[in-house]
Image (cartoon, helix red, strand yellow):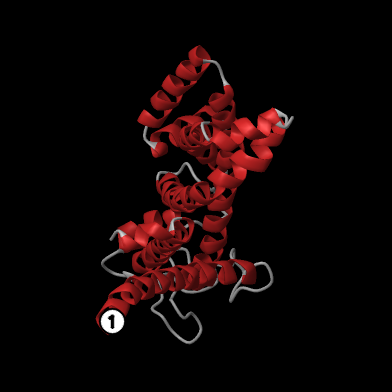
Amino acid sequence: MTSSGTSVSAPKRRRSLALTVGLALVGLNVAVAVLTLFWTPYDPLNASGGRLEAPSLLHWLGTDRLGRDLLTQLMIGARTALLVGTGAVVIGAAIGVSLGVLAAFATRLADDVMAATLDILIAFPTLLLAMLVVAASDSASLWSAILALGLAISAIVARLTRILAKRVLRQDYIVASRTSGTSWAGVVFRHVLPNIWPTLSVNFALQFGLAVIAEASLSYLGLGAPPPNASWGRLLQEAQGTVYTAPIGAIAPGIALVALVIGMNLLADGLRDIADPTRGRSR
């Protein structure tokens, strides 16, 4: 009996640890981002420090090639990453969930057309689709990057929502609800959305991490947030020429980016286990 109890509790401890670590990593980034609204070690535009200074008591992570405090830039980058990730997921969720629910209620022909369109959009890599949207705008900006990533995410969310909503609509209690006089709008808000939301929330967490990586890639290519908005991707791009003489300039934003993405993935994994308790027992 003790052996059985141990085998059951071990996966639970691993899932709990993954969720805790994920929350800690994401929470740390959120705390840093909120802190930048009130305080940073230096003004983000202050370039009075020496060029490529080593870490010291004045500049804990040193300075970049322009003489700016690297820790300050890194902190502002956390705020940019969270803003882009949150904005992209909100846009993607609003558009994707709406289209997915409509597709679930559509006629067979309309559903087939929408499904084919979503498959075509999903076939495009998220970064490539975002680059096309940003390039189509007048100039690269933080908001154009958020909009581009949100549109790219919406196709993935729409397809998942369509599949989940159609599965719910086939249940017997939907027929009973309609028979009792519940409108289709009532069915959506009382039955469809509450039942598909746990799975969607897991996907949103995963898409958040992908949006952060995509924004860093756009900034690295010069299509993301323009100066003076600090971005981890642009910090990596600016540090590539001095990676051997001042490696901290590339290491610090790289670690910050990886930590946030890993934290979101662990958080998504924890949410998946909460949404589907039987999943852990099948491992």
In this view, the residue farthest toward the bottom is: 57
Seen at 38% across and 72% down, the residue is 12
Secondary structure found at label 1: loop
- Number of numbered discs visible in the structure rendering: 1
- Nearer to the camera, 82 or 178: 178
Q: Is residue 29 above or below residue 92?
A: below
Residue 140 in sight here: no
Seen at 47% across and 59% down, the residue is 271
Position of 87 compared to 220: left or right? right
Reading the image, the residue beneath label 1 is 1
Query: Where does the image place residue 167, in percent across and percent down from the top left?
Result: 48, 34
Position of 280 compared to 135: left or right? left
Disc 1 marks a residue whose amino acid type is Met
Residue 92 in sight here: yes
Query: Where does the image place residue 142, in percent across and percent down from the top left?
Result: 57, 46
Seen at 44% across and 56% down, the residue is 276
Q: Quick one: quadrant of the N terminus?
A: bottom left
Q: In this view, does 217 lie above or below 51?
A: above
